[in-house]
Image: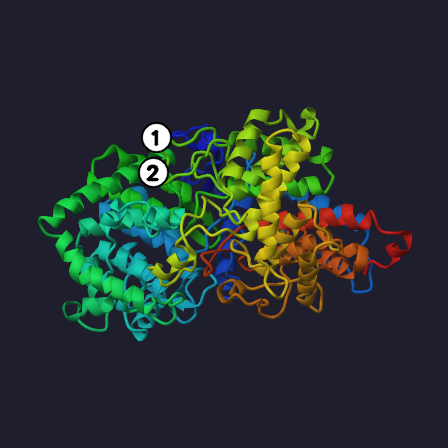
Amino acid sequence: MWRLRTGKATGDEPWLRTTNAHAGRQVWVFDPTASDAGAADVDDARREFSRRRHQQKHSADLLMRLQFAKLTPPKFGIRDNKFEDDKDVTEEAVLTSLKRVIGRVSNLQAHDGHWPGDIAGPMFLLPGLVISLHSTGALNTVLSSEHQKEIRRYLYNHQNKDGGWGLHIESPSTMFGSVLTYVTLRLLGEGLDSGDGAMEMARNWILDHGGATFTTSWAKFWLSVLGVFDWSGNNPHLPELWLLPYCLPFHPGRMWSHCRMVYFPMSYVYGKRFVGPITPVVLNLRKELYKVPYGEIDWDKARNQCAKEDLYCPHPLGQDIIWATLNKFVEPVLSHWPGSKLREKALKNVMQHIHYEDENTQYICSGAVGKALNMLCCWIEDPNSQEFKLHIPRIYDYLWVAEDGMKMQGYNGSQLWDTAFTVEAILATELTEEYGSTLKLANDYIKNSQVLYDCPGDLSYWYRHISKGSWTFSTADQGWPVSDCTALGLKASLLMSKISQKIVGISLEANRLYDAVNCLLSWMNGNGGFAPYELTRSYAWLEFLNPSETFGDIMIDHPVAECTSAVIQALVSFRKDYPGHRREEIDKCIHKADGFIQSIQRSDGSWYGSWGVCFTHGTWYAVRGLVAAGRTFKNCPAIRKACDFLLSKELPSGGWGESYLSCRDKVYTELEGRHPHVVNTSWAMLALIDAGQAERDPAPVHRAAKVLINLQSEDGEFPQQEIIGVFARNCTITYSQYRNIFPMWALGEYRCQVLRTRSPEEHGNAS
């Protein structure tokens, strides 16, 4: 049986480092000696997911829920006592709904205070890990037969009807997803006729769409590592670029951190022209993936080939000219003496930065792609190195098991993010004392997860921002500070400080709050906007050089509405409690951030959501930030336009339901079937409540509340619906806790800010 272990219970492995007793760590372990009690329920959940996998592509984390319920299977049916159209929403009904969901959420909390959950979704993460492990000879050592069984289950479960795989679990088939997933299954022992014909269908899809030469640059890189794609078919990843003067606006150290931490190790592997062992499977893949014999492929032509299904960001002609120049004139010089001397220096420099990243993230790394790449680089440098051994146990931080199988998460979790949001949601219900034990555990986790030190050395040399006082997206061990995560951690800490210590424990000390404020102020760009990880270090035109065909706006750390709003909210809260601390700087920051949010509003009144789906997400964040800054419906045209936008997108039946296609196409797109989504509905509802909609016409808010209550399940949870997170414009990611956090938050605000404040005559008109 698979068991989820969290916190200190995960820390008994050798070669494992931590800064805070593994607070927040979540690892799935297969226990062959475990009781079979509950195995039937797990099997039922797996069969049901597989049966409905083309209709409901998102797992509901049932294995974790079965474990947390002590193997008592929860009921997932919708409640029978729904509100009819002519029935009023009562405060009693809302209170009952809130108590049921908070009780359920409390039962899903880990002993160290965080909420474990799935943050997977992209289909290109597992292949990089499997190819790296295969190339280092560690595949069967690191991934047991049970791991491999669950990975195969996951990959088959997310195969599309046409035989291919998408960029993410809800995406139509792409060459990127299809080629890498097919290769992964072959490396995991699947044959040409495995999967009841699924492998044959996959190969047919690949060949029908031109073969593997038409995959994306990232896939070409991984295929080259494996030995089924020639390195000459790649556009150059020159490690020498990192030796250029930093003053150049296109220096790679100016890139968005996630982009930087992928292309850093890619440049090392490319510079080494590393190829893994040529096994019989590799030789067979050379035959299976292409429409012409491997020896006849025109690799120079293949460099810029890309299937139309993958081409979200086509290369401009100028970029292709740059690649051709580097490939034909620069790369030959650097790969031969005396230019090879410069390459040696460049490779040494790149490895120094890779080791710095590994050491300062306890070998977790900034994300899943960088994790697999850095580990591979350490092995290439020295197969017997301590660094490679330190990487191995941190692989499991990224693996998550649910009823659809084992997946690789984009991060090592979303622990701080979900915990801080959950705290704010529970406090919005004003049921603090009733759920004090839950809040105390959460408070402990938030305190234990603050980053207490800056990274060592000259931060500018290592292209790093300050981190002392910040919070990461996940755990303190992961180490990468994030602006909105720091804002959430600060705001949650301030909210907790207002509650009796007998209920939630000791508050965060003032000097640690000051450190958090210092971080927030340091992140403000000249235009008043805040990007997620660092200051925006270069110009938007750098996107012209985006080498990936699949991802958008990845070259620099762009300031966005969500991060800017989160910082405003946190600083406003801090200013109320500590009015004398850096008051002038904080006032100026809030003023400029307020102006930035208004400046990026779209003509239809919405804001684009960069990290959630999509316009409901961005608009909720923006409105909340503006309101925190002192704006109202009456004095702010931006808020009035935002309300008009949200009301125009309300579904006829009430509520909101937005597709991830909104993110990709940058046009508001409803979910198929025009059904409401509990998270989109909650975001829109929260924005309207903040904007005072209940004072003008409360009917849309009443309808939204009714939608949420009617969708609540018997066990108190809300349903897992379509995927709700996004990054790089075109790729979605799971936030499995959102389905409970935001309905709880919205109904809490509704109860306290709408139902309790309406006039007696309105009490009979809440329909």
Snapshot quadrant of residue 652: bottom right
Q: Quadrant of residue 136?
A: top left
Considering only order in the chain, which callout, 1 or 2, is on the residue closer to the N terminus? Answer: 1
Seen in the image, is 691 located left or right of residue 49? right
Q: Amino acid at mark 1?
A: Gly
Which residue has dot 1 on it?
Answer: 457
Q: Amino acid at mark 2?
A: Trp
| Residue lying farthest to the left in this orientation | 337
- Decide: is 133 above or below 165: above
Q: Position of residue 589 (x, y in %)?
A: 58, 42
Residue 395 image point, x, y percent:
36, 42
Tell me: 162 left or right of 627. left
**Quadrant of image for the N terminus:** top left
Q: Which mark is residue 462?
A: 2
Q: How many marks?
A: 2
Q: Nearer the viewer, residue 489 or 708?
A: 489
Is 315 located above or below residue 364 in the figure? below
| Residues at circles 2 and 1 in contact by the CB criterion of under 8 Å | yes
Give the structural element (helix, strand or loop) at label 1: loop
Q: Residue at x 68, y 48 (%)?
A: 627
Residue 121: mark: none
Q: Nearer the viewer, residue 456 or 46?
A: 456
Q: Which quadrant, please, contains the C terminus? A: bottom right
User: Callout 2: few (<14), some (14-19), or many (20+) C-alpha neighbours within 10 Å?
Assistant: some
Q: Nearer the viewer, residue 520 or 262?
A: 520
Picture coordinates of residue 312 (x, y %)? 41, 66
Given the current orientation, which residue lies at the most extreme bottom position? 208
Q: Is residue 285 in view?
A: no
Kindly state the secondary structure of the residue where label 2 is placed.
Answer: loop
Query: At 32% across and 73% down in the image, what residue appears?
Result: 209
